[in-house]
């Protein structure tokens, strides 16, 4: 069965392509390479032995999208990752985020409406909950007013999918990721932040390898046991496997609902300091860091109630924080030995 993966050359997309191919799916990638590299396609093939069909174009291009769907009438499902995702950048260029993230989604939904493809898995985020009133946060917890245009595009996308799926007889699942980290065990694919990383783990590994001078810990005055902010970190391979489970659920018509939502996390919250300690213990390196002020827009603490996803999807995240950090470090070491991806 053919599955279209948009953003399949990106961080979570590439790991999902690998898992899909290993489960016997025939994968087609659309990616404009705006935040990824063409060499990832060859690296996916090096892991699985299969080169995925690859189309380079921008999904906001309505004509290109239409042509793609006309020439691919036999898609069994779509996993839609392609989107801009930098929270800070979205604050200064909101229209860029709305235009890109929403236009591309609507072009895909129109393509689905016209073609025979009925199954959509969407890449959403725990950011839709803002700072939840109750922890761990459940899927039924209220969606709070967005703190960033990026987060707002995820909220809006979920609603666009919910109404379109109902009107056009589609089946859809939005997966709300907590904090994906780590890399494939082969160290052939992983996160490739362009420029200075925004996210914690790439910043940690780049500091340890000497690319960055020191890590800034954003805030130690939160209402948490050690004062630093708490997140639910999940290994990218565990996350990728959940996408295969979700697409299978849609293909097998396990649920009658046209739109479902699942949290993807481990259910455990770790503080920034705990993440640093874990990294230091698995890498054997001591990290140069300093405590700074809070980062504007950060929530204090968030972690998932995963019981619904565990029960309904029959999926559970397996990797520990130490395993996640070890794989992120192995990836950084592989990158430093190989300039191809820089
Ligand atoms: C946020 C969003 C997430 C989104 C992601 C995209 C929430 C809860 N999460 O993740 O949905 O997909 O951005 O980028 O809104 N930190 C430091 N120093 C650093 C970097 C980070 O101390 O140099 C801290 C942050 O303050 C935070 C934690 O590390 O407490 C994790 O930060 P990060 O990796 O950027 O992810 P989120 O901001 O949680």
Image: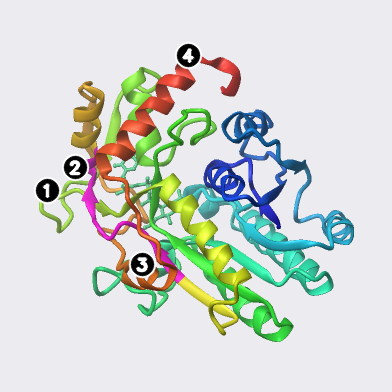
Q: How far across and down, in percent of the image, does residue 175 sit?
A: 49, 64
Identify the residue shown where x is 75% and y is 68%. 117
State the separation of the CA atoms marked 4 and 2: 28 Å
Q: CA distance from mark 3 to mark 1?
A: 30 Å
Q: On the rendered structure, is 112 left or right of 206?
A: right
Q: To which residue does mark 2 refer?
A: 274
Q: Residue at x 76, y 49 (%)?
A: 58
Compared with residue 54, is residue 100 higher up or lower down, i.e. above or below?
below
Disc 4 residue lies near ligand 1 with CB under 8 A? no
Judging by the rendered image, the residue that carries numbered circle 3 is: 310
Q: Is residue 231 visible?
A: yes
The residue that appears at 71% across and 41% down in the rendered structure is 52
Tag 1, which secondary structure?
A: loop
Q: Which residues are magenta?
A: 262-275
User: How many labels were placed on the picture?
Assistant: 4
**Residue identified by numbered label 4:** 337
SS of the residue under disc 2: helix
**N-terminal-most mark, 3 or 4:** 3
- Rendered location of residue 272, percent (x, y): 24, 44
Mark in front: 2 vs 3: 3
Earlier-in-chain disc, 3 versus 1: 1
Q: Is residue 87 above or below residue 199?
A: below
**Dot 3: what SS?**
helix
Expressed as whole percent of the image width and height from the top left, the position of residue 124 reads 51, 62
Quarter of the image containing the C terminus? top right
The label nearer to you, 3 versus 1, is: 3
């Amino acid at each position: 069965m053919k599955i279209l993966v948009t953003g399949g050359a990106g961080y979570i997309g590439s790991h999902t392509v690998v898992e899909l191919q290993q489960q016997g799916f025939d994968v087609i990638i659309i990616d404009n390479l705006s935040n990824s590299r063409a060499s990832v396609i060859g690296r996916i093939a090096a892991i699985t032995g299969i080169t995925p069909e690859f189309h380079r174009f921008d999904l906001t291009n309505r004509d290109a999208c239409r042509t793609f769907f006309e020439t691919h009438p036999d898609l069994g499902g779509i996993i839609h990752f392609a989107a801009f995702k930098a929270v800070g950048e979205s604050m200064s260029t909101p229209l860029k985020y709305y235009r890109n993230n929403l236009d591309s989604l609507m072009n895909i939904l129109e393509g689905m409406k016209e073609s025979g493809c009925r199954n959509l898995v969407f890449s959403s985020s725990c950011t839709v909950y803002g700072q939840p009133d109750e922890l761990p946060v459940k899927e039924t917890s209220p969606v709070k007013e967005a703190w960033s245009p990026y987060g707002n595009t995820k909220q809006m996308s979920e609603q666009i999918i919910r109404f379109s799926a109902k009107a056009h007889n589609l089946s859809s699942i939005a997966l709300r990721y907590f904090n994906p980290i780590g890399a494939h065990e082969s160290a052939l694919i992983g996160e490739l932040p362009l420029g200075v990383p925004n996210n914690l783990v790439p910043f940690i590994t780049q500091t340890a390898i000497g690319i960055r001078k020191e890590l800034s810990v954003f805030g130690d005055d939160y209402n948490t046991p050690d004062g630093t902010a708490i997140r639910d970190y999940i290994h990218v391979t565990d996350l990728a496997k959940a996408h295969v489970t979700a697409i299978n659920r849609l293909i097998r018509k396990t649920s009658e609902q046209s739109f479902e939502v699942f949290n993807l996390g481990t259910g455990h919250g770790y503080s920034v300091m705990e993440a640093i300690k874990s990294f230091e213990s698995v890498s054997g390196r001591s990290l140069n860091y300093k405590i700074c002020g809070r980062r504007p827009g950060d929530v204090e603490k968030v972690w998932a109630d995963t019981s619904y996803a565990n029960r309904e999807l029959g999926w559970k995240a397996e990797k520990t924080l130490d395993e996640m950090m070890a794989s992120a470090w192995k990836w950084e070491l592989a990158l430093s030995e190989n300039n191809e991806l820089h």
